[in-house]
Image (cartoon, rainbow, N blue to C red):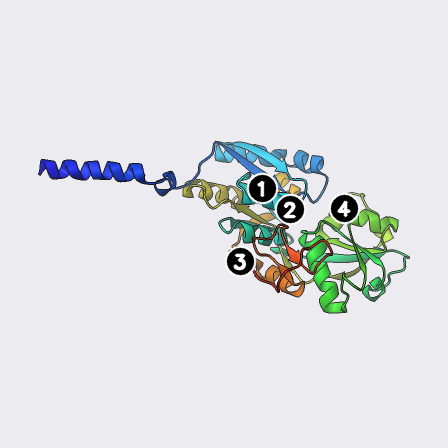
Amino acid sequence: MLNRRRFQFIAAVTLAALLPLGAHAEGKNPSKLRVALLPDENAATIIQNAQPLKRYLEQTLKKEIEITVTTDYSSMIEAMRFGRIEVAYFGPFSYVLAKSKAPNIEPFAVGVERGSPTYQSVLIATAGGPVKTLADVRGKPFGFGDQASTSGHLVPRAHLLKNHQLNGETDYRPVHLGTHDAVARAVQAGQVPAGALSKTILDNLSAKGMVDANKIVQLELSAPIPNYPIAMQGNLTPELKEAIRAAFLQMKDAEILKSFRIEAFAATDDKAYDILRDTAQILKLDLGPDQNHPYAGDATRAFQPATPFKFLGI
């Protein structure tokens, strides 16, 4: 009996030694969490506005928090893909792109604005300019934000194609200006006669006096878009993931919520973003993880040639 027990003990120890570390580790529990925020406005402003969030998460999670703003949406997707950040506040479409490249990331919270977890893109024109309706966009430049922006590019681009048969490859000239506020200012100044951005951001810029609402005409709104999700790496420990989830879903600090331009966070999951995958089909985007760019297809001349829409890793 003693020899049998000794054999079982030795066998168990030997097996444990042969197993890879991940086989008996439940997940990662780093002492520092890197939290990335969307580069949809000036980076310095975003970092400054995020200091209350940093303090709240440090107090709630008992961990060091590093707030980071990537140079663009694509950099944020790649940072999540290669594990250089643990938590990210994505645009809806940039989340879908990230999910295609990093299938294990988990969306868990979505912003609620005006009682709804959705928002809209607004298509605007210069007041008194040559664009009176969207039909007038034909043959003219049209201002978009970052190429991976949901409300600043992909949704309004699909809106123009689906509802007005305006194709950016042949019917007008897309001009990518980087951020939402850059689009609003360019349209206001008449540098481009029309453009698109988040309706929420435009309202915020107008309220702060950063753009003159009298110099901009709002032409049309897009269909509702699921709001910006917060996602985390799927390889964190279950306890840490639950703590992160609770920290956002139970957040009551008005100052922090205001920095996100929301009233609260609500629970969400990956299925809520299927509407963006439908948008990808309209634009014939290939979201496969083997693309060198975060997306490819017909949406802009910068995209790589791609086979008809395919979505992998979901």
Of the numbered discs 1 and 3, the one sitting upstream in the chain is 1
Q: Residues within 10 Å of mark 2 (few under 14, many from 20)?
A: some
Label 4: state its secondary structure: helix
* Residues at marks 4 and 3 touching, judged by CB atoms closer than 8 Å: no
Q: Position of residue 107 (x, y in %)?
A: 53, 50
Q: Residues within 10 Å of mark 1 (few under 14, many from 20)?
A: some
Of the numbered discs 4 and 2, the one sitting upstream in the chain is 2
Identity, as a three-letter code, of the amino acid under mark 3: Leu
What's the mark number on residue 79? 1
Q: Residue at x 18, y 40 (%)?
A: 8
Q: Which residue is mark 2?
A: 74
Left or right of residue 81, residue 4 in this image: left
What's the mark number on residue 307? none
Of the 4 image quadrants, the one containing the N terminus is top left
What's the mark number on residue 312? 3
Residue 206 visible, this orientation: no
Between marks 1 and 2, how big is the CA–CA gap?
9 Å
Left or right of residue 286, residue 215 in this image: right
Between marks 4 and 1, how big is the CA–CA gap?
24 Å
Residue 41 visible, this orientation: yes
Between marks 4 and 2, how big is the CA–CA gap?
19 Å
Left or right of residue 178, residue 246 in this image: left
Of the numbered discs 4 and 3, the one sitting upstream in the chain is 4
Of the numbered discs 1 and 2, the one sitting upstream in the chain is 2
Q: Position of residue 60 (x, y in %)?
A: 50, 35
Between marks 1 and 3, how big is the CA–CA gap?
19 Å
Q: Residues within 10 Å of mark 4 (few under 14, many from 20)?
A: many
Q: Residue at x 65, y 39 (%)?
A: 70
Specify the quadrant of the image occupied by residue 19. Answer: top left
Label 2: state its secondary structure: helix
